[in-house]
């Protein structure tokens, strides 16, 4: 049997807790079969952390993330937290994790299953057999556009709110 691995589960908000409950089932399944053992801890991030601690990522949670073998992340944000000050929006927890853990890429697999090919808005012949991996380089701040227009300083790694009329991107 492989040695124990430590995992930190951060379910977050929205669909995150639902997805993470299924992740827990897989971990338990592997544990029962003794394929690998996991030491699992769980903490709060995003809106759930804001509700409990007043911040989107508590320092204690970040400290746990820095020492485990892997962090499994759900999702953050939702309408409940839309009107918060920019500096404490749920997404800031994710950005802090990315920066402090030194993450540089987000891997997004996309597969079109045969049974779903006709459900696509694209023609079947375009999506049939689709099996790609999209690599988003996180050092380039376009992922920040998903929730707000911002200015990004690549040297300091800090995001600041930009006007809706501009997006300032300054490569190093």
Image: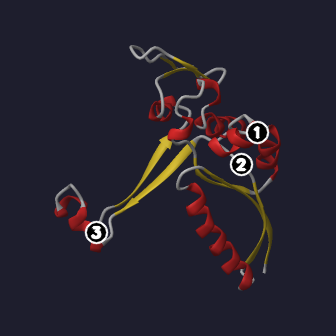
Q: Earlier in the sequence, mark 2 or mark 1?
A: 2
Q: Earlier in the sequence, mark 3 or mark 2?
A: 2
Numbered label attached to residue 44: 2
Mark 3 crowdedness (10 Å alpha carbons): few <14, some 14-19, many ≥20: few
Camera-near label (1 vs 3) is 1
Mark 2 crowdedness (10 Å alpha carbons): few <14, some 14-19, many ≥20: many
Q: Is residue 89 left or right of residue 6?
A: left
| Residue visible at 47% across and 16% down in the picture | 168
Q: Secondary structure at mark 1?
A: helix
Closer to the camera, 151 or 92? 92
Q: Earlier in the sequence, mark 1 or mark 3?
A: 1
Distance from Cα at disc 3 to Cα at disc 2: 34 Å
Distance from Cα at disc 1 to Cα at disc 3: 42 Å
Q: Is residue 98 above or below residue 152?
A: below
Residue 12: percent from left, percent from top: 63, 50
Residue 112: percent from left, percent from top: 32, 65
Mark 1 crowdedness (10 Å alpha carbons): few <14, some 14-19, many ≥20: few
Residue 106: percent from left, percent from top: 53, 46
Numbered label attached to residue 116: 3
Q: State the quadrant of the N terminus.
A: bottom right
| Residue visible at 77% across and 42% down in the picture | 62
Q: State the quadrant of the C terminus.
A: top right
Closer to the camera, 120 or 44? 44
Asked if the residues shown at circle 2 and circle 1 are in contact, with their CB atoms under 8 angstroms apart, the answer is: yes
| Residue visible at 76% across and 39% down in the picture | 53
Numbered label attached to residue 53: 1
Q: Is residue 74 above or below residue 163?
A: below
| Residue visible at 54% across and 51% down in the picture | 14
| Residue 29 picture quarter | bottom right
Judged from this view, the residue extending furthest toward the bottom is: 33
């Amino acid at each position: 049997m492989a040695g124990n691995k430590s995992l930190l589960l951060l379910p977050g908000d929205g669909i995150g807790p639902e997805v993470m409950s299924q992740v827990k089932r897989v971990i338990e399944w592997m544990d029962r079969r003794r394929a690998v053992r996991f030491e699992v801890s769980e903490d709060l991030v995003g809106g759930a952390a804001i509700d409990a601690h007043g911040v989107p990522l508590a320092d204690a949670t970040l400290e746990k993330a820095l020492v485990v073998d892997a962090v499994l992340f759900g999702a953050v944000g939702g309408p409940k937290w839309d009107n918060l000050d920019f500096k404490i929006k749920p997404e800031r927890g994710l950005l802090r994790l990315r920066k402090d853990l030194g993450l540089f890429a987000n891997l997004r697999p996309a597969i079109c299953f045969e049974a779903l090919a006709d459900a696509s808005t694209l023609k079947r012949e375009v999506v049939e057999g689709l099996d790609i991996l999209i690599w988003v380089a996180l050092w380039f701040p376009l992922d920040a556009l998903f929730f707000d227009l911002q200015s990004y300083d690549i040297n300091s790694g800090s995001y600041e709110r930009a006007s809706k009329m501009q997006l300032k991107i300054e490569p190093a």
